Image (cartoon, coloured by chain):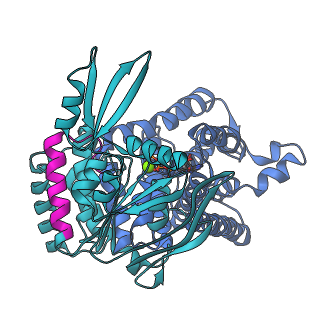
Chain colours: A blue, B cyan
Amino acid sequence: MQFMTILWQEYVIFKRKFWSTTTGSMVGPVLYLIAFGWGLGSEIKVGGTGYVSFVIPGIIGLSTMTASFSNIANSINISRIYEKTFEEFMIAPLNMMVYAAGKITAGALRGMYSGLLILLLSLAFRAGVRIDAYFIAIIVLNCFVFSALGFAVGLLIDSHADMGKFTNFIITPMSFLCGTFFPLDKMPFGLKQLIWVLPLTHTSLGLRSRGEDPLSMASHLGILMLYFIVFLFLGARLCKKAE
Amino acid sequence: MLVFENLTKKYGDITAVDNLNLKIEEGEFFGLLGPNGAGKTTTIRMLSTLTPPTGGSISMDGRKMDRNLTELKAKIGVVPQHMNLEGEMTAWQNLELHGRLYGLRKELRRKRIDELLQFTDLSGRAHEPVKNFSGGMKRKLMIARALMHAPRILLLDEPTVGLDAAVRRKMWDLMKELNKNGLTVLLTTHYIEEAEVLCTRVGLMNGGRLVELDTPKRLIEKTGKFVLEYFDHGTTRTSFFNSRQEAIESAAGMEGSVNIRPANLEDTFIKLTNRKVGD
Ligand SMILES: Nc1ncnc2c1ncn2[C@@H]1O[C@H](COP(=O)(O)OP(=O)(O)OP(=O)(O)O)[C@@H](O)[C@H]1O
Ligand SMILES: [Mg+2]
C-alpha cells in the first residue's frame, strides 16, 4: 500500500516535530482570539450575536487553510528544490497519482489537526461553537482544498522566496478578507463579488451557516468541492511533468 | 540490456547530452568518465526517468524507458550525486520507506535493512536521525538504500566522493561482488583509478559527447597512470609515466617541489585532446 507508505512517512516526521508543530500552530489562533475575541469582542456585536462567536468560525477557517496550505507547499517545494528527497519518489515504481493523493491527504490531516486545536482553544475562551456534521464537512473540505492548492503551488514555484510571495499576495489577503473577521456585506461593490468567488469565503459562510437555506448551504459544499477538483487536477498534471 | 539511441538533452542553449549512442550489456560494469559538466549526471537522470530526453531514447530489455513504466523502474537502483536522504528520519526509517515504496514484504524489509546496515557499519546508528550523520555515513546509507530492493541495474553517480580510503575500498569490493553476482552497474566517476579497478568498459564524455569508448586498461595506456607535476619557469608542468617508480626516477634530478600522484580524468582528458590536436 504505497498510499499508506506516504502517510506513514508524514506521520513519522509529524511525530518527530510534534511539540514544535503543535505549539507553532497555536500561536496565530491564540493571538487572533486575544486581539479579536477578547480585545474587540466584548464590545462589538455582529448580526445580533457577540463578536467572539462570530469570529471563531473565521479563525478556524483561516487557520486550517494556512496549516493545510503552507505545510504541504513548503514540504514539496523544499523536498523538490533543496533536499531533493522528491527524487526518491520520482524514481520509485510509484504512480504519481498515488503520491499526490498521499501528500494531499497528509496535508489535509495536518490542517484538521490544527482545526482541532483551535476548537479546544475556543472552549477555553468559552465561545459557544455549535459543531454538527455540516460544520465538520466544511472544515474537512477546506483542508483538502488548500492542501491540494499547496501541493500544486509547491510543484509550480521554483524558489523558496517566491513561495513567500505567493503566501503574501494570495493566502494572507484571503485570510483577512474572506468573511473571516467581518461579514462580506460590509465590502464595496465589485470587491465583494470578487471575494465571493474565493474558496475561503465559502468556508467562512459555511461555518456560520446557521439559519441559511439548504440550497445555499449546499452551494458552499459544492463550490469548495469544485475548487478541490480543479486544484487536484492541476497538481496531478504538474506532478506528472515534474523534473 | 541498456540501449541509448541518439540520446540528447538540451537546457536552453546548453546541450548537456549530445547524440549519445551506447549499448550496455547485461552484467557489465560500465564507467562514464568526464570532467565537470560533461553530461554524466544528465545521462543518469534521463535513465532513471527524472528528466525526459529532448531527443532520442533509452531502452531497457527492448522497452523504452518511461516514467510510468513502474515494472522497469523497479529494476533500477540509483545513488544520486547529491545527498537526498530524509534528514528528519532515522537510517532505519529511510531504508524502511524505500522498501515500502518498492513493495517489499515486511519480513524481507526487516531482513534486508539489518543486512545492509550491518554491511555499511551503520547498525549502531540505525535509530538516529540522518541529519546528524557525517557526509560519508550518508553516502553509505544512500548506497544501502539503492540496494534495498535488489535491483538488476545499479546507477552510481560518483558514489565514493567523500568516503575515506578504507570505506572506498570496501565499497569497491562490494560493488565488484554485486557485479559478479549478475548486477549490471553504471558508474560515473572522476577517478580513473576507480574506473580501472572496477569497470569492464569505460566511456569518456566531454561536452555532452562520448569521445572515447574502451576498456580502462587501454584508455590509461594512452596517457600513463602516474603524473609528475613540477614547477618550471613560473608554470606547473606535468609529465606522464606508467608507474610511480618511473615518475620518481624522473623526479630525482629535479629541484624545487615536485608532486607525484595517480593520473585522473582531467590529465587523461587533456592529454587525449592534445594528442588529437597534435595529430
Ligand atoms: N537543470 C538544469 N538546467 C540547466 N542546465 C543544466 C541542468 N542540469 C544540467 N545542466 C547543464 O548540463 C551540463 C551537464 O551537466 P551534468 O550535471 O550532466 O554534468 P556532469 O558530467 O554530471 O558534471 P559533474 O562532474 O560536475 O557532476 C552542464 O553544462 C550543466 O550546466
Ligand atoms: Mg554529475
Was residue B162 drawn as part of the magenta stretch in this picture? yes
Q: How many marks?
A: 0
Left or right position of A118 against A186: left
Query: Quadrant of residue A52 in the image?
Result: top right
Vertical side of B168 occupied by B93: above or below: below
Q: Nearer the viewer, residue A60 or B192?
A: B192
Q: Quadrant of the N terminus of chain B?
A: bottom left
User: In percent of the image, x 55 and y 57: which residue is there?
Assistant: A151
Left or right position of B85 against A191: left
User: In percent of the image, x 83 and y 43: which residue is there?
Assistant: A187
Q: Nearer the viewer, residue A167 or B251?
A: B251
Left or right position of A11 against B182: right
Vertical side of B68 occupied by A141: above or below: above
Q: Nearer the viewer, residue A175 or A181?
A: A175
**Can residue A3 be seen by looking at this rendering?**
yes
Q: Residue B238: x and y, percent? A: 37, 31
Query: Quadrant of residue B113 in the image?
Result: bottom left
**Can residue A60 be seen by looking at this rendering?**
no
Was residue B170 drawn as part of the magenta stretch in this picture? yes
Left or right position of B234 against A56: left
Q: Residue A102: x and y, percent? A: 44, 66
Q: Residue B174: x and y, percent? A: 16, 59
Which residue is farthest right?
A189
Q: Residue A48: x and y, percent? A: 70, 45
Vertical side of B160 occupied by B151: above or below: below
Which residue is farthest bottom?
B62
The boundaries of the magenta stretch are: B159-179
Query: Quadrant of residue A146 in the image?
Result: bottom right
Q: Main secondary structure of the magenta part?
A: helix
